[in-house]
Amino acid sequence: MSKGGDIPVRVRQMRYEADTILSVEFETLDGRDLPEAAPGAHIDVALGAECRRSYSLTREITGGPSCTVAIHRDPKSRGGSAYVHETLRVGDKTVISRPKNNFPLFESADLSVLIAGGIGVTPILCMIRRLTADGRAWKLHYAARCRAAAAFCVELDALEKASGGKGKVHYHFDDEQNGALVDIASILAASPNAHFYCCGPEAMLAAYEKAARDVPREQVHVEYFSSSEEVARDGGFEVVLDRSGKTIVVEPGQTILDALIANGVHVPFSCAEGTCGTCETGVIEGRPDHRDMILTEEERAESKTMMVCCSGSKSARLVLDL
């Protein structure tokens, strides 16, 4: 499943950061520098012959041949995290994509309030590194099942100390709070002029979105690393490829991506859940049924693009820029 622009790499180092979290450092095979990537960016990693997954960078890339991601061993893994924890080893070769960023940091904010749950701390850590280096004020609320499940605590504590009083880490461990959840509404209400960032499990993201309804949208930032919506299986419509004029029928039980692949049409994709943006495709005609976690409400209304891995159609015919 190699794609144009993929970068050949090898695994340089692997390290446990928590009970179920491994950090994996990749380096280019030829020693060339990787493309630059700002805080919040992610890469797609090829894991075996038929699997690609998106993982957030723990460090921004400003030069050099290496980058690092952190991966939680999901007990319901469909192949990605299980492969990393059980099969991938130092020295193994694979390919990664060029970095992409759907979760950028607004670096000039007077205060950044960051909320992380479990492995969702990965892009947040990258942001805190930048904020601390720039002397910006920040607060982190980091939730995990228990201390043993929380990654990067030593480094976060060091960043708090290095911030000169401008940064603060608040930990929330479920087993120490009698099961009480993080009060996201109170966190947002306490700093009405801040920029807010959240990355974590679906329940946390849903609570965050609900609490942020009255916050100006430009101050609200969210990263979905797992889709909270079912993959569309509507079917029963036609997709016309504008460049070739080819018409493809999307059958019941298929996604648009399924149908394209079955007909030999190459479309870049990774997560297959509408959370990474890799398969974003231009829409020329028709009404998509958007089910991704990338597009804004305004972008959905315009329907100039769609994520073909998960979205369906509200019209009997879609014309795509393919």
Image (cartoon, grey):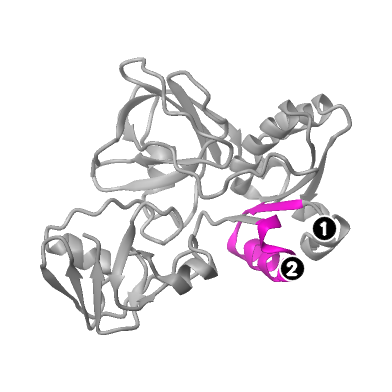
Q: Is residue 301 left or right of residue 6?
A: right
Q: In this view, does 270 lie to the left or right of 18?
A: left
Is residue 43 within the magenta segment? no
Q: Please tell me how many numbered marks the rendered image carries.
A: 2
Residue 140 appears in view:
no
Q: Give the range drawn in magenta.
A: 195-220
- Report the residue at 23% width, 44% height from top: 1
- Report the residue at 59% width, 37% height from top: 39
Determine whether the residue tagged by mark 2 lies in a helix, strand or loop.
helix
Q: Is residue 312 above or below residue 164?
A: below
The local crowd at label 1, few if under 14, some if 14 to 19, many if 20 or more residues have their Cα within 10 Å, is: some
Name which quarter of the figure residue 6 lies in: top left
Name which quarter of the figure residue 157 lies in: top right
Residue 66, horizontal then vertical, whole percent: 45, 22
Amino acid residing under circle 2: Ala
Closest to the observer, 98 or 78: 98
Determine whether the residue tagged by mark 1 lies in a helix, strand or loop.
helix
Residue 236, horizontal then vertical, whole percent: 23, 83
Q: On the image, numbered disc 2 is attached to which residue?
A: 211
Closest to the observer, 84 or 287: 287
Q: On the image, numbered disc 1 is attached to which residue?
A: 187
- Report the residue at 18% width, 60% height from top: 261
Q: Which of marks 2 and 1 is nearer the N terminus?
A: 1
Quadrant of the drawing holding the C terminus: bottom left
Amino acid residing under circle 1: Ile
Task: For the residues labelled 2 and 1, say whether their Cβ atoms are less than 8 Å apart.
Answer: yes
Is residue 208 within the magenta segment? yes
